[in-house]
Amino acid sequence: MHLVTIKRLERASEEYREAAREIGGWVKIVKAARWRNFEELRATFPDADDVDGFVVFNIRHNRYQLMVVVHYAKFIEDRLTLGHVYVGAFLTHKEYDRWCALTPKGRAEWLQF
């Protein structure tokens, strides 16, 4: 998968040092993947959730949530495209709870795509 807006993850790694190793591991796994659908993503990350079209990954045993949008790989002219993962936000659990309380429109506005 092509990872877009990776700078947000670099900033999160600097701000939340205890999560930096897990963020780095997540990046390596995502770059090596070619998911075609959510079920394939879930086979790699069983704790991932689909919330209003956003994929939520738990980091550091649910202390943080990584919010992304995934454009899955697909076949075009018998070739599998790369697919894209767009990083929207890296949230603490408290911030994620506030995000969940918003309307779907408010949730979309919170994330920085």
Image (cartoon, rainbow, N blue to C red):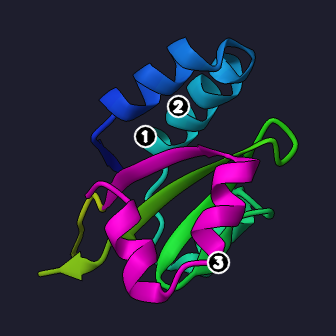
Relative placement, left or right, of 94 versus 109 is right
Determine the image quadrant of residue 22: top right
Tell me if I can see residue 28 in this picture: yes
Could you tell me how far apart the alpha carbons at marks 3 and 1 are, in whole angstroms? 31 Å
Label 2 belongs to which residue? Answer: 28
Name the kind of residue labelled 1 in the image. Lys
Question: Picture coordinates of residue 89 (x, y %)?
Answer: 45, 48
Query: Where's the C terminus, which quadrant?
Result: bottom left
Relative to 105, residue 47 above or below = above
Furthest toward the left, the residue is 77
| In the image: residue 13, left or right of residue 100 | left
Q: Nearer the viewer, residue 41 or 4?
A: 4
Residue hosting label 3: 101
Name the residue beneath numbered marker 1: 31
- Please say if the residues under marks 2 and 1 sit with CB atoms less than 8 Å apart: yes
**Residue 20 located left or right of residue 28:** right
Quadrant of residue 31 in the image? top left
Residue, x 32% and y 28% (percent of image)?
A: 7
Residue beneath the point at 38% across and 33% down: 8
Residue at the spot x=64%, y=52% of the render? 95
Task: Pick whichever of labels 3 and 1 is earlier in the sequence.
Answer: 1
Q: Which amino acid does the dot numbered 2 rest on?
A: Lys
Residues marked 3 and 1 touching at CB (< 8 Å) = no
Quadrant of the rendered structure where residue 97 is? bottom right
Secondary structure of the residue carrying tag 3 is loop
Looking at marks 2 and 3 on the same chain, the residue that comes earlier in the sequence is marked by: 2
